[in-house]
Amino acid sequence: MAIVEMLMPKMGESIIEGTVLTWLKKEGDTIEQDESVLEVATDKVDTEVPSTHAGIIKQILAKEGEVIAVGAPIAIIETSGEDTKPTIPNLADKENSKAELVASAPENTTAILASPETSKSDEVEDDRFYSPLVLSIAKEEGISKTELSKIPGTGKDSRVTKQDMLSYLQTRTSGQKVASSPIPSISAPKVQVSISGEDEIIEMDRMRKMIAHRMIESKQTSAHVTSFVEADMTNIVLWRERNKHQFKEKFGESITYTPFFIEAVAKAIRDFPMINISVDGDRIIRKKDINVGMAVALPSGNLIVPIIRKADQLNLVGIAKKVNELANLARNNKLNADHLADGTYTVSNVGSFGNVMGTPIIPQPQVAIMAVGAIVKKPAVVETPTGDVIAIRHKMFLSHSYDHRVVDGSLGGRFVKRVADYLEAFDIHTSL
């Protein structure tokens, strides 16, 4: 028999840790390779983690609610094969891994524990380990070392988890907030909210809290500017109406308008590659792959953004199949972190809610996002060989929000106009 460690897997770009939500198996259970054994939450998605080996779970190392670094052992599995020495980490190894995790945290996330702004009277003895995520929240919320040390922890060895921080912030009084905090508190309102006996109090679920945090973070990070263009969608509308039944019969898939939007965006990104970038301090990272995210509504009403990778290398049929696959996974809560990772640009269809336009917020670390509005019939001037005429056309607004730190108005405006040009130039005689 062989003993192997099951490690916390990497679950997407910038994810350095995960919280164990639920173990689906217990010690002594027999498991198959790729069988789901636990549920893990990150700051992007809740997902099931499959076993890396077939065998028997001999020991569970990570308790429910515990925050575990990516690459750290979470279980010991006994498999068939030659006997090997178990690699169960000892206490020293565990402390070393904690130190490595803190060292790998984003710059300044550990400064809260050793800030020169902290007075000597604020210094306390605190040997608890704090994850980079907890330290980041503490820094953003202006929580001092003394205050942090007093927060009860529900994790292993009384470790403070992300949920502990969120719960603490809900009960924290506004007077404790440090005025110099760089990012406003999500949980604590600036003004006391008046509540009457007839009002209903609804607790935010975990995803809503994450969305709230991400939206504020993005507005604090990127200088948002939005440009608008109106596109004539008549050719696409007529082609889709004429071919949607044949498309489904031939490919077994329905075709919505979303594949047309993503195809046009991918083409425009090839023309303007400086839209396909991220910002890293004073550096601009230009992405080689064009990975387009599409906002999808979950059953809860929250939005999530799965990614169509290398969208510029897919034809309309390929994009339609990928759109349908990801939409179905999202609606059935089957998306995992890989489906959400590595996006370089995002499209949000606000038209599906009946909205004609919107001003979307950029998903970090991307620098741009496009909202497509409802397609509506409008009278319009149409040029013909015999002169201009008034005709009924199918029109749609495109709203392009971009980060003005690195995307100037010229680039942002020309990009959205190029997307509209590709949509309007769609060949109505395109064959399936």
Image (cartoon, grey):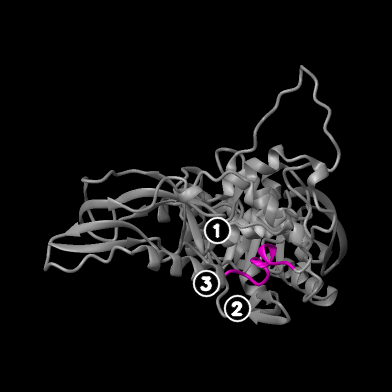
Q: CA distance from mark 1 to mark 3?
A: 46 Å
Kindly report which numbered mark, 1 or 3, lies closer to the viewer in this rendering.
1
In the picture of the structure, the residue carrying the numbered disc 3 is 310
Image quadrant holding the N terminus, namely bottom left
Queried whether the magenta region covers residue 110, the answer comes back as: yes
In the picture of the structure, the residue carrying the numbered disc 2 is 287
In the picture of the structure, the residue carrying the numbered disc 1 is 127
Q: Secondary structure at mark 3?
A: loop
Q: Secondary structure at mark 1?
A: loop
Q: Secondary structure at mark 2?
A: loop
- Dominant SS of magenta comes to loop
Q: Position of residue 188 (x, y in %)?
A: 76, 42
Residue furthest out toward the top: 197
Give the residue type that dot 1 points to: Asp
Residue 227, visible in the rendered structure: yes
The span shown in magenta is: 104-115
Does 3 sit above or below residue 189?
Answer: below
The answer to the question of whether label 1 and label 2 lie on touching residues, with beta carbons closer than 8 A, is no
Task: Look at 33% across and 55% down and name the residue there.
Answer: 50
